[in-house]
Image (cartoon, rainbow, N blue to C red):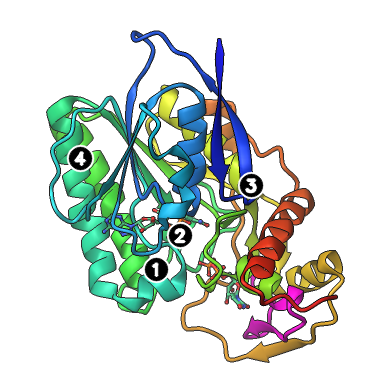
């Protein structure tokens, strides 16, 4: 049973149709998504709303934007709450996807103390809520818990190599202690937990100014500006499209496996190769420019996803090229609408 609802889609910047499943009351869950107005959160909200659930978004709009979820405002299954997770909140829910936390290095380093408070106090508050209402809670942790890894690719059993006092520590150590708290609440109070270790993810609705490599390179290429590579460009990352991540989060939340699980696409590139790839896909005349390396930049990163395959039956299905094509289309529209595009 589907109800077709018209909604404004900020991904395609047009009036779009969403098929929303009609669930019986017994199957409809109340689901909290913290950070639901952000890049990943808003795609997750779309999936949960279309599956017919009630969705509550809690966000302080630090890096998230109302327009990412605006198409759901007014729907009877949707609620948007402006709230900072560092403060407690009383809600009645069945599941909690806890995403609230700035994710790009410039954003999480902008106010490191706030980033630490968000990961620690914010996660304690969500665990306290989960304990009170007996909800299952999923933390979006990160491949950054592996730091600058000495094991390649990275399996969940690797404990990591993190500088505890470097500029990335507020994020890395914040997420590491958030994971510690998840398992302390599980052991001490029986809270039902899930931990996703997410590897670099890209797609429409990434913040154009968030400084991550995918958004920076695409915008620079579309504008024929220099593509800025930090350091030698020999460092590697593995990139996953956001739809794959959302599928992985939903499978992890609804499966039986409760140990940390890598969610990422093992397709690995050096930053130099990635810059060339973006130039080719955008047919850009941009020049490549090397800038100073950033401190503690991990030299290599690629997920071992055998746990996700075995325990939750998940693996990525979108290849990087088609994901990038959609993301390039999205940023072209964003630039066009802001009048900033340079014709190619
Ligand atoms: P994002 O910055 O787009 O989204 C984060 C959201 O959290 C934003 O809407 C922001 O306003 C909100 N937020 C931040 N601090 C808050 C607070 N104190 N109270 C309430 N809301 C707050 O980032 P994203 O890429 O969508 O990341 C979502 C989650 O996934 C984060 O937890 C991030 O650590 C994790 N993650 C993302 C990636 C990636 O590549 N995108 C990789 C690893 C982990
Ligand atoms: N990077 C780059 N130029 C940019 C932005 C990022 O060379 O304009 C590099 C960065 O130094 C890192 C990689 O790209 O090696 C990925 O950076 P991002 O900020 O996207 O994510 P990270 O994995 O570092 O959190």
Q: Nearer the viewer, residue 91 or 245?
A: 91
**Nearer-N-terminus badge (3/2):** 3
Please say if the residues under marks 1 and 2 sit with CB atoms less than 8 Å apart.
yes
> What residue is disc 1 on?
162
Please say if the residues under marks 4 and 3 sit with CB atoms less than 8 Å apart.
no
Q: Which residues are magenta?
A: 220-236
Eyeballing the image, is 328 above or below 29? below
Q: Secondary structure at mark 3?
A: strand
Q: Position of residue 207 (x, y in %)?
A: 52, 64
> What residue is disc 4 on?
127
Residue 80 appears in the rendering? yes
Q: Secondary structure at mark 2?
A: helix
Q: Is residue 36 left or right of residue 322?
A: left
**Nearer-N-terminus badge (3/1):** 3
Mark closer to the observer (3, 1): 3
What label sits on residue 14 in the rendered view?
3
Name which quarter of the figure residue 278 lies in: bottom right
User: What's the distance in space between the residues labelled 4 and 3, CA to CA?
Assistant: 38 Å
């Amino acid at each position: 049973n589907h109800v077709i609802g018209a909604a404004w889609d900020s991904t395609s910047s047009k009036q779009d149709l969403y098929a929303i499943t009609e669930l019986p009351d017994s199957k409809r869950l109340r689901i909290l998504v913290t950070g639901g107005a952000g890049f990943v959160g808003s795609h997750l909200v779309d999936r949960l709303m279309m599956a017919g659930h009630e969705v509550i978004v809690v966000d302080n709009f630090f890096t998230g934007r109302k327009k990412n979820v605006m198409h759901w405002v007014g729907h009877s299954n949707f609620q948007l709450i402006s709230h900072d997770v560092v403060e407690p909140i009383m809600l009645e829910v069945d599941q909690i996807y806890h995403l609230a936390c700035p994710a790009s290095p410039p954003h999480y380093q902008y106010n490191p103390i706030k980033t630490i408070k968000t990961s620690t106090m914010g996660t304690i508050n969500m665990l306290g809520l989960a304990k009170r209402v007996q909800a299952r809670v999923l933390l979006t942790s990160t491949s950054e818990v592996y730091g600058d890894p000495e094991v390649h690719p990275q399996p969940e059993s690797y404990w990591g190599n993190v500088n505890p006092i470097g500029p990335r520590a507020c994020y890395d150590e914040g997420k590491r202690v958030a994971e510690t708290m998840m398992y302390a609440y599980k052991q001490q109070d029986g809270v039902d937990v899930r931990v996703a270790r997410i590897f670099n993810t890209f797609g429409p609705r990434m913040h154009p100014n968030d400084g991550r490599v995918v958004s920076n390179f695409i915008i620079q290429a579309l504008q024929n500006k220099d593509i800025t590579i930090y350091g030698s460009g020999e460092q590697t990352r593995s990139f996953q499209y956001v739809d794959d991540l959302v599928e992985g989060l939903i499978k992890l939340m609804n499966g039986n496996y409760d140990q940390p699980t890598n969610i990422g696409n093992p397709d690995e590139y050096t930053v130099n190769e990635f810059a060339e790839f973006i130039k080719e896909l955008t047919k850009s005349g941009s020049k490549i420019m090397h800038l100073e390396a950033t401190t503690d930049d991990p030299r290599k990163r690629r997920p071992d996803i055998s746990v996700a395959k075995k325990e939750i039956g998940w693996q990525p299905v979108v290849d990087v090229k088609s994901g990038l094509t959609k993301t390039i289309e999205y940023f072209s529209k964003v630039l066009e609408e802001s009048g900033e595009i340079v014709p190619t």
